[in-house]
Amino acid sequence: MTDPSEALAAAGADEPAELAQLRALSAARDRIVEAVERVVVGQRAVMDALLVALFAGGHALFVGAPGLAKTLLVSTLARTLDLEFSRIQFTPDLMPADITGSEVLDEDPATGRRSFRFVPGPIFCNILLADEINRTPPKTQAALLQAMQEGRVSAGGRTHPLPAPFHVFATQNPIEQEGTYPLPEAQLDRFMLEIRVPYPDERAEKTIVARGDDPPPPAPVLSPAELVQHQALVRRLPVPPSVVDLVVRLLRATRPEDPSCPPEVRRLVRWGAGPRAGRQLVAAARARAALAGVSAVRAEDVRALAHPALRHRIVLGFAAEAEGVDPAQVVDLVLAAADAGPSRP
């Protein structure tokens, strides 16, 4: 494990202050988890991944069957952080202006003068839950692209900044294909992590089924200003060159045209992960290490997040579809190739 003093000294950081902030972040994580688990039962791994995306400043796509508390988890998290929360139910008739807002014509009753006024849409919040995002056409899905990448919205020839922090947590139902629109690769690439939501285990399901009234919503345990401070701390966490090398090996091993791509991956994959995937994988690894109270990113943080960071960015070819190969299996091959070290052309 990386020695905190050495890592922070190498980064030129104020050692005592940074270590205290790391301890405060780890303690805040424990308080958040405790508060959320009073409401949401049996999804600890999902919650951990959600917190990684949140403290890394990224967006996340939740993939799971209906009724697995995806919406409840996100809304409960927003309450524990005292963040403004909006939910949009994505439907085929949803228009871009229904998300971003629109210009309306106002008339002054005294002077009769007319002017346009921007009415913000539900995207102007801290946490936006895009429910069943794949049920709306690509034109409407694209309304989120600028907001997710730049933290602002353009409407009526003007640019409007979104509040900070701003996160999009989207849900997607994998078992209902009728009336759905696959997310474009450009949109998928904006999601830092794809988080798969499984069914709860037997013990957790018994607790859920036996529960009577829903528990009261939790009180805030962290303020928005404190969250922003913790996110800034995560961005300052040092990343050793060996970890950067590992991330680059992973990325290049997903690209069929790259000499380091394993033959089996080249046969199965049509398009691999780009540089944005690497940046976001490093950002997520920073958050995972910081939430654990560790002062520098470790290779184990990268390996633990390789699947949620890469599998939605890999476009499979015909051979993979014909053989029923899942992107997760491709990531397994990529991890094995990266662990073996750079191959020679």
Image (cartoon, rainbow, N blue to C red):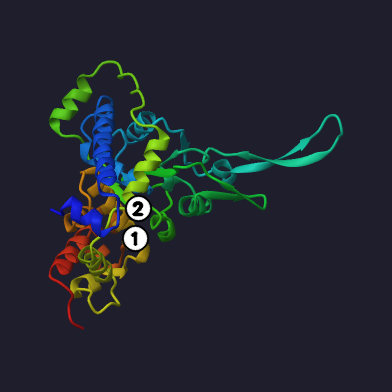
Q: Residue at x 18, y 23 (%)?
A: 207
Find disc 2 in the rendering and name its residue: 192
Choose the circle earlier in sequence order: 1 or 2: 2
> Would residue 75 be seen by someone viewing this image from the given angle?
yes
Tag 2: residue type?
Met
Query: In the rendered view, would you say 335 is above or below 68?
Result: below
User: Mark 1 = which residue?
Assistant: 279
Apparent side of residue 324 relative to residue 82 in the rendered image (left or right): left
Residue 99 in picture, x, y percent from top left: 54, 42
The residue depicted at 25 percent of the width and 49 percent of the height is 15
Q: Position of residue 119 (x, y in %)?
A: 64, 38
x 16%, y 69%: residue: 337
Disc 2 crowd, CA 10 A, few/some/many (<14, 14-19, 20+): many
For the point 15% across and 53% down, the residue is: 3
Q: Give the quarter of the figure containing the C terminus.
A: bottom left
Side of 273 relative to 335 (left or right):
right
Q: CA distance from mark 1 to mark 2?
A: 9 Å
Three-letter amino acid code at the position of disc 1: Arg
Residue extending farthest to the bottom is: 345
* Residue 176 visible in the shown view: no
Q: Going by the picture, which residue comes out furthest to the top?
A: 212
Q: What kind of element bears circle 1?
A: helix
Name which quarter of the figure residue 118 lies in.
Answer: top right
Q: Residue 154: where, in percent of width, then height?
A: 60, 51
Position of residue 10 measured from the top left corner of the image (x, y, whole percent): 24, 59
How many other residues sit within 10 Å of disc 1, few (<14), some (14-19) or many (≥20)?
A: some
Q: Secondary structure at mark 2?
A: loop
For residue 319, side relative to residue 159 (left or right): left
